[in-house]
Amino acid sequence: MKNDKIKKIIKRKYKKPIICLTAYSSTVAQILDKYCDIILVGDSLGSVLYGMKSTREVTLDMMINHAKSVKKAISNSILVVDMPYKTYRNNKEAYQNAKKIIKLTKCDALKLEGGKKIINIIKYLIKKKISVMGHIGLLPQSERGTFRFKGRREIEKKKIIDDARLLCDAGVFAIVIECVQESLAKKISNSVLIPTIGIGASKYCDGQILVTDDLVGLTNFTPRFVKKYSNIRKIIRSSVLKFKQEVINKKFPSKKNIY
């Protein structure tokens, strides 16, 4: 069931751009909540936090635990949670896991990867009053080997456009478009009545999403679509070095740091 916040997001189509970032903890979520329309607890936490090689290794319990942490810190943003790999292979499994995530995290919506292949599952969840965000283009849960942008071939373009239309008709409230050519992203955005959220998919989408850890320079992930707005790794290194030097030189703790 679409709540009022989600209805407002749908009305942003062709209007004010939608701001979306990832969060996996209360600390980060509290900062983002002032600036974001949507906060995504993404299965990207597998590689970002756990050093996993792919999102396929992420478990349902991981997603729930991090989403619970994020939920505690937000009051303005919509909270969307990724359903991890192999948790929505059929209607029954999808619904049971979706109910569990929503019950334990109090999230507003769930995100599932894919179009035609899982459209009946998405329809079933929406019929059961669960708000769903779609995800097309590059699908990390389905990829093997090196990721590459999508929409190079005409047959691939047609499939992605068809997936977008199917998702829109099924009732998803927004669609993430990942790593597709600019012209294709524009065509998709103009062919559906719901907002599109781009990641490596051009300014023609109705909003943008990035992994926050990439945005602030905490990771070494440097694909073309990522812009690093700061260098947290450098700040952390500098702080740790200063701490080390002060401990070695007996400057820390000083009198103001002790009881």
Image (tube, grey):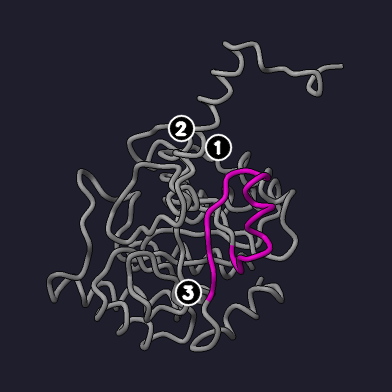
* Residue at disc 2, secondary structure: helix
Question: How far apart are labels 3 and 2 at the CA level?
Answer: 28 Å
Identify the residue at horizontal 57%, vertical 45% (top origin): 24
Q: Does residue 151 appear to the left or right of 27 in the view shown? A: left
User: CB of mark 2 within 8 Å of CB of mark 1?
Assistant: yes
Amino acid on which disc 1 is placed: Met
Residue ID for mark 2: 50
Location of residue 164 by image quarter = bottom left
Q: Nearer the viewer, residue 162 or 12?
A: 12
Q: Which residues are magenta?
A: 18-38
Mark 3 lies on residue? 207
In the rendered structure, which amino acid carries the disc numbered 3? Gly
Q: Is residue 88 above or below residue 119?
A: above
Is-magenta flag for residue 27? yes
- For residue 81, which quarter of the picture? bottom right
**Residue bearing the label numbered 1:** 62
Earlier sequence position, callout 3 versus callout 2: 2
- Left or right: 32 as drawn, with respect to 177: right
* Image x and y of residue 201, in percent: 33, 70
Locate the N terminus by quadrant: bottom right
Residue 173 vertical placement versus 186 (above, below): above
Label drawn at residue 170: none
